Image (spheres, grey):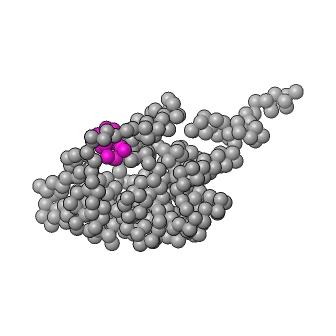
Amino acid sequence: MEGNHEKARVRLCYLCNQRRAALKRPKTLEQICRECFYEVFEEEIHQVIVKNQLFKPGERIAIGASGGKDSTVLAYVLSELNRRHNYGLDLFLLSVDEGITGYRDDSLETVKRNELQYGLPLKIVSYKDLYGWTMDEIVKTIGLKNNCTFCGVFRRQALDRGAALLKVDKLVTGHNADDIAETVLLNILRGDIARLSRCTSITTGEDGPIPRCKPFKYTYEKEIVIYPYEYFVAGIYSPNAYRGFAREFIKDLERMRPRAILDIIKSGEDFRISTSTKMPEQGICERCGYISSQKWCKACVLLEGLNKADSWCQLKVRRNEPGITVIALY
């Protein structure tokens, strides 16, 4: 009799109703076993890939690999799904060495382990080789306040240039549902209509050099953390990033209502931009040939300011209009 009561107190998995529930799933609050969690986690990502037709057989795909939790899990899951469902993809790891002592050195070691574990070729491009500066040198010149502007702009272009060297058809990144919800809020707060209109797209840059895909678009960050592969180290030069405030707000909403993240993404998808709204026209940077809506791309503008600042003055960065970075020399 006592044994029956003990069995009744054991909560079984909501999905299989056979094994003991081991965790409460953050996205749905269902209590499930680990085996079912792994299965639904991977299957949902597979369904996103299939329904959105992210890939075609024979394509060369670069995985943006930072050594953090998102890209590490993405590399494993995508290589596993590619094998299991016969996507027919040639996968590569692509990493950017920003030149951050004590941070990037360690995370690149993680990526090198992933190269061996998953059997995926690895390409590393560095800020120093591409731009002549490391992030350590940039921070030494401008301080901590505006370093995220430089790192974000340089990293995006570095990934595109690395992908071009690999001659890939697409670049996939580990941006998850939390990241996309944060971006929707940030673009609303900044009044950046151009970015708001495309930030929820699962594939972007189709009119640029290399399209980018986000297989984790509907995957919660907490579930990526639960998925037990490697570890994550936060960027040491990003404690004051504006995105951090949006992230905390998203977390507060999620605690009250787990579906809030998906609801924000859905709201972003449903935004409609007035036909009378003037959108930036994409062109080519006159200096480096990279895509740009201005005469010079952001990377070239920032580099020009850095090189001048390094020679004779202090550099400050300020925002003028959404999407436009202004370099001020004092």
In the displayed structure, would residue 42 be above or below residue 189? below
Measuring 78% from the left and 40% from the top, which residue is drawn there?
18
Quadrant containing the N terminus in the rendered view:
top right
The secondary structure that dominates the magenta segment is helix
Measuring from the top left, give residue 284's x and y in whole percent: 27, 63
For residue 77, side relative to residue 295 (left or right): right
Answer left or right for 2 relative to 143.
Answer: right
Q: Is residue 190 magenta?
A: yes
104 up-or-down from 226: above or below:
below
In the rendered image, the residue lying farthest to the front is 275
* Front residue of this view, candidates 65 and 235: 65
**Residue stretch rendered in magenta on the structure:** 187-197
Whether residue 129 is visible to the viewer of this picture, yes or no, is yes
Instruction: Reply yes or no: does residue 64 show up in magenta.
Output: no
Percent x, y of residue 289:
28, 67
Q: Is residue 101 visible?
A: no
Residue at the spot x=61%, y=62% of the render?
87
Image vertical order of residue 209 relative to residue 246, above or below: below
Residue 298: x percent and y percent? Answer: 26, 58
Res 29 → quadrant: top right
Q: Residue at x 69, y 45 (%)?
A: 36
In the rendered picture of this protein, how many numbered marks are placed on residues? 0
At x 38% / y 64%, what residue is drawn?
Answer: 209
Q: Position of residue 292 (x, y in %)?
A: 28, 59
Location of the C terminus by quadrant is bottom left
Task: Between residue 276 and residue 213, name the one nearer to us.
Answer: 276
